[in-house]
Image: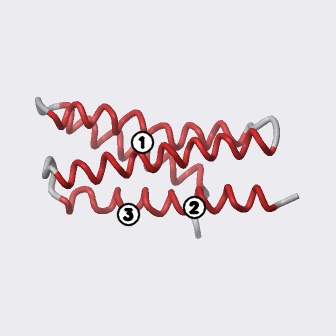
């Protein structure tokens, strides 16, 4: 059974919080990047939740578009952590794959919502 976007983004946020707790334990650049990652990674699901209560189709699309922007930012921070070898790539690969998939799903939701009348 396929999970809905709300469940997936919530579960993703939980994983981001756990990762950021780990990054916060170490001094240095990882802690700083972790804070950026925490903001962006948890914002994806928060905006998806807000979109569910959108006052109009335009409001729904706007909130999902914000979630998409946050997802893209999250992917950036994950890629940066990999590039600077702050954590092993294997530790981040599942998160990277999930946020890439969520980005595609969010983009498809926007296209579908714009096309429906």
- Residue at numbered disc 2: 105
Judged from the image, the secondary structure of the residue bearing numbered disc 2 is: helix
Q: Position of residue 113 (x, y in %)?
A: 75, 56
Asked which quadrant contains residue 5, the reply is bottom right
Residue pictured at 55% horizontal, 37% vertical? 46
Residues tagged 1 and 2 counted as in contact (Cβ below 8 A): no
- Residue at numbered disc 1: 41
- Residue at numbered disc 3: 97
Alpha carbon distance from label 3 to label 1: 14 Å
Alpha carbon distance from label 2 to label 3: 12 Å
Residue pictured at 37% horizontal, 52% vertical? 75
Q: Position of residue 50 (x, y in %)?
A: 65, 36
Asked which quadrant contains residue 59, the reply is top right
Q: Quadrant of the N terminus?
A: bottom right
Extreme residue in the right direction: 117
Q: Earlier in the sequence, mark 1 or mark 2?
A: 1
Q: Position of residue 88 (x, y in %)?
A: 15, 56
Residue pictured at 59% horizontal, 49% vertical? 6
Q: Earlier in the sequence, mark 3 or mark 1?
A: 1
């Amino acid at each position: 059974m396929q999970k809905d976007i709300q469940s997936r983004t919530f579960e993703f946020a939980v994983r981001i919080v756990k990762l950021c707790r780990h990054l916060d334990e170490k001094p240095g650049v990882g802690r700083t990047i972790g804070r950026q990652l925490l903001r962006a990674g948890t914002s994806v699901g928060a905006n998806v939740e807000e979109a569910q209560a959108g006052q109009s189709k335009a409001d729904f699309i706007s909130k999902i578009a914000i979630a998409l922007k946050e997802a893209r930012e999250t992917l950036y921070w994950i890629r940066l952590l990999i590039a600077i070898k702050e954590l092993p790539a294997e530790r981040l690969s599942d998160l990277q794959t999930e946020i890439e998939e969520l980005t595609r799903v969010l983009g498809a939701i926007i296209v579908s919502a714009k096309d429906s009348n």
